[in-house]
Image (cartoon, rainbow, N blue to C red):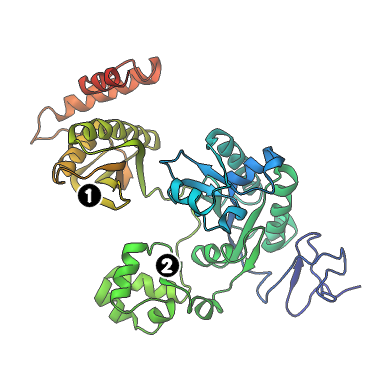
Amino acid sequence: MPDRSPSRPTLCRDCFSLVAPISGRCPVCGSIRLVTHERLLDLSVAHVDCDAFYASIEKRDNPELMPLPVIVGGGKRGVVSTCCYIARTFGVRSAMPMFKALKVCPDAVVIRPRMDVYAAEGRKIREMMLDLTPLVEPVSIDEAYLDLSGTAALHGAAPAAILARLQKRVEKELGLTISVGLSANKFLAKTASEADKPRGFFVLSPEEAPAYLAPRSVRVIGGVGAQFAKKLASDGILTVADLQKIDVRTLAKRYGETGVWLHDCAFGRHNRPVDPEGERKSVSSETTLNEDVSDHSAIEDIIWRLCQRTADRAKKAGVEGRVVTLKLKTSDFRIFTRRTSLTDATQLAQVLFRTSRALLAREPAGPRYRLIGVGLSDLTDARPDAADLADPNARKRAAAERAADKARNRFGSDAVTTGRGARIEKDRH
């Protein structure tokens, strides 16, 4: 019999046995799909990410697509939602403009998204996760964090084995694959899940995190976007190792609380727990236009529709926000974001529109835009509409919007509309 408790635990991902490998194979089932790590049996925070989710569903549902590069996304003026791993070898990436994707991969099969199908499959996987632990924090339709602390007695296995079983179940029942990152906190679990795709299983402990992270770009730290990375680069910080060389006081002096956060992440420290409720950071809506638009009046009409959608999403989620953002992408793919903070949080379309229109008015005439978006952030739980001493009619307008919402929910989206909304619909038809 093989040693079931090796000094460095090894798990077979196919038969879920703890084994002492023989020539790199599981002595129980012969599989080479093994994962070995000193802390394999005690780490319990995982990040689970579906592999090329939309494209994988399309290939599963149409096997003729299996050997082909597949892109899921909009038309020629849209962007890539996702693509299969074959398309990625040509340089196609998510969020890439479609015309660029087709330039580098002209033989790709382009498929319009079927969001209802993807959402249904995502819910099935979410239910499988909830069978393992109630501590599941959704991140998107195809990824989530899990905290499996204390579940070993319930399932009769360590979290690593439970996750391997989840991988197998998703493949068997849904014909899809997932990648797993296992660690002690969400940041390292996310980092681990990206290290071994597709169909991967990677373990990263806090002890080895500083050395693992050091040579990587600062972009490996979730929350460090392109603009912040440029700021850090201008300060001579390109890699995590560069961050590790700077003491926390200096980072705090340069970047405030963000500097302390950067220092912690550089050494693999992250203290946010897995939260089943999640943390909605913003609600938004955007649209890629069929034709570039430069006329501000026409842009205002588009913004009004986006404000309605964003407000509807905020109301459905039961949140309101204090920061309004207007996003504009020009015909040459430059992106501008303009934002302002409100005195009081809102979820009302009319307030979003007035604020967004004011932001647009500051922009010069002339540039042509291909994408427009409206967002609401700095969210809090929604409260009843309050009176505004500076605007006595504010409460009356809010009540009118709430009444219109109820009518639209009951009788359809065209049941009640504003003068602007009616004109827009008339022009569209």
Provide residue 15's location: percent of width, then percent of height: 81, 60
Secondary structure at badge 1 equals strand
Q: Quadrant of residue 271?
A: bottom left
Q: What amino acid does circle 2 point to?
A: Arg
- Give the residue at the far left of this rendering: 390
Vertical placement of residue 392 versus 155, above or below: above
Q: Is residue 94 visible?
A: no
Q: Which residue is mark 1?
A: 339
Q: Residue at x 41, y 71 (%)?
A: 218
For residue 219, which numbered disc appears in the image?
2
Q: What amino acid does circle 1 point to?
A: Arg
148 or 234, which lies in front? 234
Secondary structure at badge 2 equals helix
Provide residue 364's location: percent of width, then percent of height: 14, 46
Vertical placement of residue 76 versus 258, above or below: above
Q: Quadrant of residue 295?
A: top left
Vertical placement of residue 53 versus 393, above or below: below
Q: Quadrant of residue 205?
A: bottom right
